Amino acid sequence: MAVETPEIDLAPMQDMLANVEKEMKNPIPTPPVGTTIVWYAKALVEDDSKIAALVTKVEGPGKITVTAFRPQGMADPTRRGCLHVSDPIHEKRHNSVSMNSGAWDYVAFTKIPKEHYQLHLDALAKKRDSLIEKLATAQSIKSKSKQVESLDKELDLDDI
């Protein structure tokens, strides 16, 4: 009786690993608390919608809480979950994240310190290492499955 071994497709994990390595070449910055930034309501990145803001909390790589300072004031100047203008989510117009949290960027002509990229690089490195480990495990299982198939054919268990 032949042993059925499922085929393991490594391509999705290899694609994910390639994407993480690609992201590592272009990390998203994260300014520390107290940094003056520019906030864009509804992530509409236009000169006339620039609003001065201050980083009041770091939530994750490229994701911050901001307090905006509109000249005419606003009912709730705090916006949580605000992502950098380069985040791919802003490419989808009218999504709830962009509409509710807006987007942030550095003040014009700001030279971004290398340390501002470290949070994202650390998160990506952790993700990459986990994917490498899972890929190695999957490759090992795939190799062992082939060995079992080979032994099965060699022993010809169907004749017993």
Image (cartoon, grey):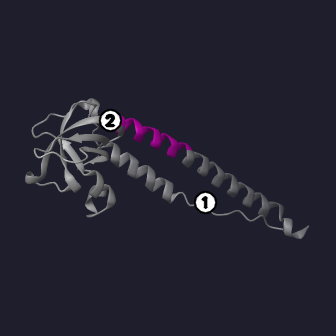
Please tell me which of labels 2 and 1 falls first in the chain: 1
- Is residue 9 found left or right of 70 in the rendered image? right
Q: Mostly what secondary structure, the magenta segment? A: helix
Q: Are marks 2 and 1 in contact (CB under 8 Å)?
A: no
Residue to which mark 1 is pinned: 8
Instruction: From the top left corner, tell me how far across and down residue 92 is, in percent.
Output: 28, 63
Instruction: Using the image, determine if residue 52 lies above or below residue 159.
Output: above
Residue at coordinates 29% horizontally, 55% vertically from top-left?
100
Question: In the rendering, at what x and y percent does residue 156 appear?
Answer: 83, 65
Residue 13 in percent (x, y) is at: 50, 54
Quadrant that contains the N terminus: bottom right
Q: Is residue 103 left or right of residue 142?
A: left
Name the one closer to the observer, 36 or 154: 36
Front-most of residues 139 and 44: 44
Residue at the image point whose x is 33% and y is 59% from the top:
96
Q: Quadrant of residue 113?
A: top left
In the image, the segment drawn in magenta is: 118-133
Report x, y in % for residue 59: 37, 39
Q: Secondary structure at mark 1?
A: loop
Question: What residue type is disc 1 on?
Answer: Ile
Residue 90 in view here: yes
Residue 57, numbered label: 2
